[in-house]
Image (cartoon, rainbow, N blue to C red):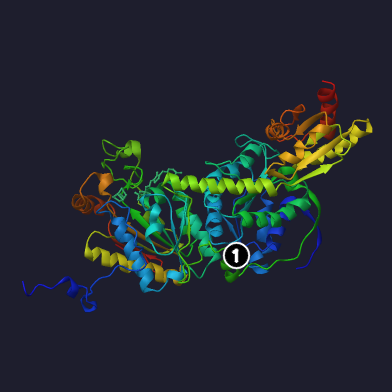
Amino acid sequence: MADTITKAEIINPENLVYKKTSMMTNNVLSYCPGCGHGTAHRIIMEVIDEMGLQAKTIGVAPVGCSVLAYDFMNIDMQQAAHGRAPALATAIKRLHPEKTVFTYQGDGDLAAIGTAETIHAANRGENFTIFFINNGIYGMTGGQMAPTTLEGMKSSTTPYGREWQRMGHPLKMTELIAQLPGTYYVTRQAVHTPVSVRKAKKAVRTAIELQQQNKGLTFVEIVSNCNSGWKMTPVQANQWMVDNMFPFYPLGDIKVDGELVKK
Amino acid sequence: MGKELKLMKGNEAFAEAAIRAGVDGYFGYPITPQSEVMEYLTAEKPHERTGMIVLQAESEVASINMLYGGAACGKKVMTSSSSPGISLMQEGISYMAGAELPCVLLNVVRGGPGLGTIQPSQADYFQSTKGGGHGDYHTIVLAPSSVQEMYDYVELGYELAFKYRTPVMVQSDGAIGQMMEKVQTGDQKIRLTEEEIIRNCPWATTGKTPNRERNIITSLNLDSLVQEKHNIKLQKKYREIEAVEVRFEKIQCDDAEFLFVAYGTSARICLKSIQILRAKGIKVGLFRPITLYPFPKEPLYKMVKNVKGILSVEMSAGQMIEDIKLAVECKVPVYHFGRMGGIIPSPTEVADFLEHQFIKG
Ligand SMILES: Cc1ncc(C[n+]2csc(CCOP(=O)(O)OP(=O)(O)O)c2C)c(N)n1
Ligand code: SF4
């Protein structure tokens, strides 16, 4: 046993490989274990930390599982009505052009009730960043169909699976947003593996940096899981996401430097 | 810019007052009969005059939520609309009341329900004075009855909105919004600096600096006990507003045996009706509520011992009459006279009703 390192040795500063960013509070996350929201919060806050933007950042979280984001993100925040975060962010950024402003929205919030606010903020080319967490379902209210719910996917309001004939098609908001001349950087990422987390964080940083250059709206979708809503274990949910969500919502940049990426 | 005497429409006076009051941002959506507010503002280039921002939103839902975002930063924000648009804003107004955010809203009321008509009405009294949106809350409601008051209540509105951290509604109607009168403007106020806002509004989301805790603007409390506490705090604020912010005007009331109670356009009509009736020897006066919420209950109650009856005149089916009856505790008869659907009653019509239906009827 002599060569095992002790706890005291582990917490030596030179052994430190990872530390929670001080831009996350010490409050216990309200998310289900395995949910992608926590990781998405963390990478955004790490970027704010690394860029030294705490005093300049105002975040907006509307209604959804992340309604309590302000309990976890260690910055000034506003809680918005369901779907309306881009309207708040528009005014905040117009009145405070020097601030870093972002919204953090679910797919029900952004692609259903808040479609108009999202599209018009994008079309006006507002200089803030939208983080769009797409888990294909309404998590907070208990797993109902979202606009993003895949065909055939079960939810509490599509108990036999979504049929487009009666329930419409899944909506690719990110591709739609990318068509608008007001958007400058549009990308789709995920946070289910260390590699994807690193890539997603890079995208978050790019978005925030571009926001500082006043290039127009920057938009980062994070395809995420909702193991509770999907009625799966976290591991199953991640696999299901890879097998089913990614083929329909392929990861990668959709618009870079104001130009659509040619596939 | 110094004081000026100008001939203006009510809607334009409101817009000019906004620029001169040092408003930071106006967010609106066109609707008759108030579109002149945004038209005037865009023509005046307030971004050059004061740095004020004017943005045409995609809907009233968006504009009220833009107000939320701006107000939460401690900025002076404003919108204007007319009845259908104000209905759309109700969720946002409730959120702002819940999150205790100051703003000034103008409702240039038109006839309803539904798309109704574009002609003047006062049928939004219930909506504006009783809460309008969901939850237990009030907005302060100021009722101008002249173009000058359209101008003056902008400044007063912000004073009250920031004093109490609450939305303030200026409730006008299509007639006052559209008519032209002379207006004495005030001096140009300079918009507040970031430092002044941080000093005046320590609660605002201006970016978390090391010297203070985070500022969070929310109306959410999942713990019911905390939410009840928040409600109790709000109710305390409303009781204080009711105690100190009541505003009203009494005209020819000293010898009056009958009383008109009316606000806005109806109050102006009643002034003419009083002339007609007094010429016939009928002693009538006007009690004009200026704050519709808080309703001037006590001042009105104090007057009942001297009068034989009260006629509420409102361009509605009879909404304010409920507050009048509560105020006078049924000590004197209270009746309503009104026209609906955008009809403005004539002074003779009102005088005839008082003389023939009310006194003799
Ligand atoms: C006006 C309004 N309608 C409905 C709701 C109820 N509601 C709360 S969260 C939510 C859906 C959230 O889903 P999503 O945006 O996908 O976020 P998630 O919870 O999945 O992260 C709904 C419908 C509400 N709060 N307000
Ligand atoms: S319900 Fe779904 S989205 Fe919400 S916290 Fe749980 S797993 Fe995450």
Q: Quadrant of residue B341?
A: top right
Q: Position of residue B313 (x, y in %)?
A: 76, 34
Q: Which quadrant, please, contains the C terminus of chain A?
A: bottom left
Quadrant (top left, top right, bottom left, bottom right) of the N terminus of chain A? bottom left
Left or right: where B95 falls relative to B307: left
Give the image location of residue A26, x and y in percent.
34, 62
* Vertical side of B61 occupied by A188: above or below: below
Binning the other alpha carbons within 10 Å of mark 1 as few (below 14), some (14 to 19) or many (20 upward) gives: few
**Along the line of sight, the residue nearer the viewer: B141 or A181:** B141
Image-based side of B273 in relation to B75, left or right: right
At which x and y percent is residue A110?
41, 51
Q: Which type of secondary structure does the marked residue at label 1 adopt?
A: helix
Outermost residue, left direction? A1
Residue identified by numbered label 1: B200
Query: Which residue type does callout 1 highlight?
Result: Asn
Q: Quadrant of residue B186?
A: bottom right
Can residue B160 be seen at all in this image of the molecule?
Answer: yes
Q: Quadrant of residue A70?
A: bottom left
User: Residue placed at 37% from the left, 52% from the top?
Assistant: A106
Outermost residue to the bottom: A14
Q: Callout 1: residue from which chain?
A: B
Q: On the picture, is B50 further left or further right than A10?
A: right
User: Is A262 or B208 nearer to us in this picture?
Assistant: B208
How far from the left and from the top, in percent, is residue B78? 62, 55
Left or right of residue A246: residue B87: right
